Image (cartoon, helix red, strand yellow):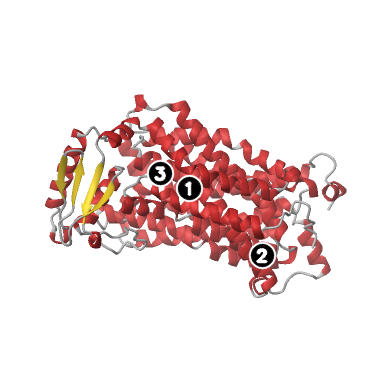
Amino acid sequence: MTAVAETGTGRMTREERRVIFASSLGTVFEWYDFYLYGSLAAIISVQFFSGVNPTAGFIFALLAFAAGFAVRPFGAIVFGRLGDLVGRKYTFLVTIVIMGVATFIVGLLPSYATIGVAAPAILILLRLLQGLALGGEYGGAAIYVAEHAPHTKRGSYTAWIQTTATLGLFLSLLVILTCRLSMDKESFESWGWRIPFLLSIVLLGISVWIRLKLNESPLFQKMKDEGTLSKAPLTESFGQWKNLKIVLIALIGLTAGQAVVWYTGQFYALFFLTQVLKVEGQTANILIGVALLLGVPFFVVFGALSDRIGRKPIIMAGCLLAALTYFPLFAALTHFANPALEQAQRISPVVVVADAGECSFQFNPVGTAAFTTSCDVAKSALARRGIPYSNRRAATGETAYVEIGASRVTSFDATDDIDGAARRGFDAMLAEALVQADYPDAADPDAINTPMVVLVLFVLVLYVTMVYGPIAAMLVELFPTRIRYTSLSLPYHIGNGWFGGFLPTVAFAIVAASGDIYSGLWYPVVIAAMTFVIGMIFVPETKDRSIHH
């Protein structure tokens, strides 16, 4: 390391700027690739899962998206070990190539109508490769920057990496929106959706070219020259209690809470706007995009602040604020984005009256269960429409029904509804009763209080920047150099891949079961509160630690 890097004095060197830019650009690109699939899931379900009914097709499309999250911890293990054995530079060069090529192939992949079942099979394989690559990318980028950074500026330098997930999401939304506006709907859904995937090859080329010009991390190179590299990083990281204990503390006391705050502030907020409040998709994307643009600088602000006051106070404050304010903030979103829904709920509350023994918790991660009881039919129909409701117990065996103000709509058992006639009839009666009670089919664009919606979304993003901005530096500082890549990557990707990645699915299942459109927030609130308590007790402050060990 240079004298600047050791002491933290002086201005950022040209090499340090290149390190930050290359690492950040690569991770922006990888997150762009990853988010494209989630944003286009509805179209992808039609293109690759048309062999089943539309509802099942969408479920399978979401499951293929979830598969990328599920394998991220395994990618962390594979590439983390490689990064500690071979080097930081070459490992995250490999991850970006895998991610980029897999994404480009999605843009070329023939549909189900062309090659049959091979299409979804290849798509899922590509999603698994993307997830594995992403599992190795973040740790490499964060460590590479931190190991080049001056001691007193690790928070501010690594915070640039923390902007990449949000910038990747924003870039994917921008490219998709541009493609949508440049052609008619039919063309986009037929072939135009492939353009954002194909464009990724340009980003891949630029990212690889820049990363090839980088040198290996000075700390890793020093250990390699001295012959002190770990020969078994997996065993050292997870087979020795002194290190495994730190991994577990990092997971429960840091990354789990950080992940749910991150996904709630960006993904679940978008889901809530579009699926629950029925804000038109393009409008919702623009609202989220503006909030993201306003919030992105604060990743660097809080990263730099963590160099002064510590990482722990900022991350813990973000978790605590999220746990305390999510319910009022999402209630404010309803008030400002769809006031007609709020008013209808107050004047004509909806109640599902059902035998509790018939009601399932409609969480089906493998897409195999069928929810056909009269209770499940009624609740799923209301959940799809984003209609809040309460529950009242009926007599055992009684067919469920829905009360909407003074109206009553009787549900049905869908077991024998082979042609769907009963469901269509129930849906029509339910829709009519909701119209009579002034429940809106969609949010009225003219009634949306845009400045206030953006303000609420900005606050949600601000919490994201608090928990995410300083966390890369803190994770790097928790682990020794010889096993840093392996040890850091696993808790980060279990937290973000599992605790965070499955948040929208779990939250929606909670909403469908309870009828309260805000009840899904209990998932991030409980996890964030858990991380705050565990983190305050067990997580040490790390900003003054040397990472030269």
How packed is label 3: few (under 14 Cα within 10 Å), some, or many (20 or more)?
some
Residue neighbourhood size for the residue with mark 2, other residues' Cα within 10 Å, grouped as few (<14), some (14–19), many (≥20) = many
- Disc nearest the viewer among 1 and 2: 2
- The first of marks 1 and 3 along the sequence is 1
Secondary structure under tag 1 reads helix
Query: Left or right: where does residue 326 sit relative to residue 79?
Result: left
Residue linked to disc 1: 35
Mark 1 or mark 2: whose residue is earlier in sequence: 1
Mark 2 is on which residue type?
Ile
Q: Which residue is mark 3?
A: 271
Sequence-wise first label, 2 or 3: 2
* Above/below status of 454 relative to 319: above
Where 243 sits versus 203, above or below? Answer: below
Viewer-closest of 232 and 354? 354
Labels 2 and 3 touching (C-beta < 8 A): no
In the drawing, does residue 545 fall left or right of residue 412?
Answer: right
Which residue is nearer to you in this view: 479 or 539?
A: 539
- Residue furthest top as drawn: 446
Q: Residue furthest right?
A: 3
Amino acid type, label 3? Phe
Q: Of circles 1 and 3, which is in front? A: 3
Amino acid type at mark 1: Tyr
